[in-house]
Image (cartoon, rainbow, N blue to C red):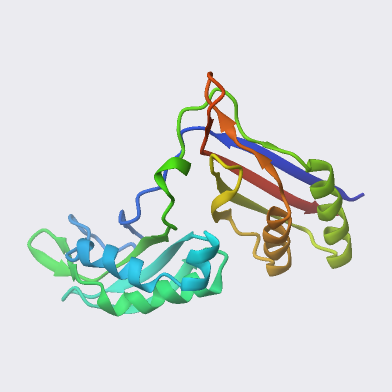
Amino acid sequence: MRVFSFLLLLLGSLGPAPLLHSQAASSQAFTQAPRLQNAEELQQLLTAGYPDHLRKLGIGGRIQLRLDIDAAGAVTHSEIQRTSGFISLDSAALRLVPRLRFEPARNGAAAVPLTIVFPLGFSPAVPAEHRPQEAARGPSVLNEGDLKHRLRRLCGRNSLVAQTSVKLLIGADGRVRSLEFLEPSGWRGLDRMAIEIITNARFAPASTSSGMPVGSWLVYTFSCIY
């Protein structure tokens, strides 16, 4: 049996997740985790390193890097632990690694090596009038039937068994102002489908109790299950 699902979830007040909170990923004993020493510079590097073609499309994403940090605070190895769903963003994140400066982890007074998971995020700039606000009514899809038909056809054509979740910021004009994968499927076919379907979506924006259109967050979950 084939099941094709298309789930819309309103996230009325969900904002960007913190970008610079690392966590230990190894069993090395420590009393103090590594500390990033150039957080302000990193924010500037994220802006400068944001792939231009994705920025213009309003596509962002979050990446989790696995970093080995030695007792001197240098990153000796890096890899993607959790992808953004976009190769360009993952590659941009890896390019920033040599610019990261850490105070090393410590176990008591001694500096020790440690492996950590370190998140980075790329978020497109959104004009003030389209940023998320308190809404009495959430955004709605004006052509949902057409989108479900596209998903059914694309899932069947590619014989996919996967699921992906996409976070959207719908502006006060009903346009998608920001897009990022919350849960990449691991299947590029389905992730590409999700973007194709959203590109063809038409939205009525969220609105306040007085009827004024405002920006609002949404999450779509696309599933292909055989």
Residue in the image at 10% along x and 66% along y? 110
Residue furthest out toward the left: 109
> Does residue 65 appear to the left or right of 102 in the view shown?
right
Q: Quadrant of residue 76?
A: bottom left
Q: Which of the pair 4/123 is nearer the observer?
A: 123
Q: From this viewpoint, is residue 112 visible?
A: yes
Of 33 and 137, which appears nearest the observer?
A: 137
Picture residue at 44% right of the left edge, 58% below the top: 124
Residue, x 38% and y 76% (percent of image)?
78
Q: Is residue 31 above or below residue 45?
A: above
Q: Residue furthest top?
A: 209
How many numbered marks are there?
0
Residue 45 in the image: x percent, y percent? 30, 70
From the viewer's perspective, tell me whether residue 105 is left or right of residue 96.
left
Residue in the foreground of this view, choosing between 218 and 77? 218
In the depicted structure, whether residue 8 falls above or below residue 88: above
- Which quadrant of the figure contains the C terminus? bottom right
Inspect this view and state whether residue 82 appears. no
Task: Residue 207 in the image: state x and y as whole percent.
Answer: 56, 28
Task: Tell me if 108 is positioned left or right of 44 in this view.
Answer: left
